[in-house]
Amino acid sequence: MKIQTLIILSLLFVVSCKCNKINQNNAKMQIVETVLISKGNLYGSGSEGIAKQNTVIENLSDWERLINQMNSVNNVSEGFTETKIDFSKYAIIAVFNDVKGSGGHTIELDISKTSEKTLVTVKYTSPKGNATTVMTQPYYIAKISKQDLPIVFQ
C-alpha cells in the first residue's frame, strides 16, 4: 500500500511540474503588434511569377521588387495601406499561397515572440461550400517592428 501511494504521489508531482513548465512557456509568449499592409488575392493566374512562400523583407530594394512583381498583371499595391516603409524601424512579413482554381481561399497570421524568436503562425483557409471559379493566389502582407530575433514560420 505504501508503494502504491508513493507511486501515485510521484506521478502527481511529475504531471504538475510539466503543467507548470507549459504555463511558464506560454506566459513568456508576447503578441507582436502588426500593421496590415494588405491581404487578398492576386488574379493573374500565376502570371506574376510568385511562388508559394513565407518571406521577410528588410530593405527597400526587395520591397520595391515585390511590389513591382505583384503589380505586373494588376495594380494591386493601389489598395495597400502604405508603401513607404522605414526599414530602419520596420520589417515586412509577406506570405503567398499557391495559385488556386477558385476563390474563397484566405491567409491569416498570428505573430508572437519569446526572448529567443519571433514566431509567425500561418493559417490557410479554404472555402466552404460554393466558391467562384476564378484563378486566385491568396497573400498576406504585414509590417512589424524590426527586431534582432530570428523570425520562424510555422
Image (cartoon, rainbow, N blue to C red):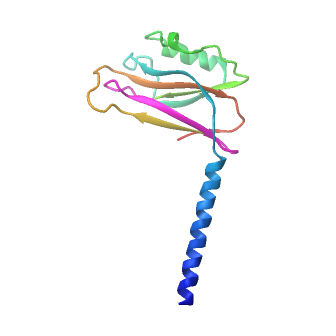
Residue 127 lies within the magenta run: no
Above-or-below relation of 107 to 85:
below
Q: Residue at x 50, y 26 (%)?
A: 140
Q: Measured from the top left, where is residue 58 in percent x and y?
A: 66, 25
Residues 98 and 15: in front is: 15
Residues 8 and 53: in front is: 8
Query: Is residue 68 toward the left or the right of residue 150 in the image?
Result: left
Could you tell me how many numbered marks the image carries? 0
Above-or-below relation of 59 to 150:
above
Identity of the residue furthest to the bottom in this view: 1
Residue 99 lies within the magenta run: yes
Q: Measured from the top left, where is residue 56 in percent x and y?
A: 60, 29
Q: Residue at x 61, y 55 (%)?
A: 23
Q: Measured from the top left, where is residue 72 in percent x and y?
A: 47, 11
Residues 4 and 59: in front is: 4
Above-or-below relation of 59 to 11:
above
Q: Residue at x 42, y 28 (%)?
A: 106
Above-or-below relation of 27 to 135:
below
Q: Measured from the top left, where is residue 115 in percent x and y?
A: 70, 45
Q: Residue at x 46, y 27 (%)?
A: 51
Magenta residues span: 97-118
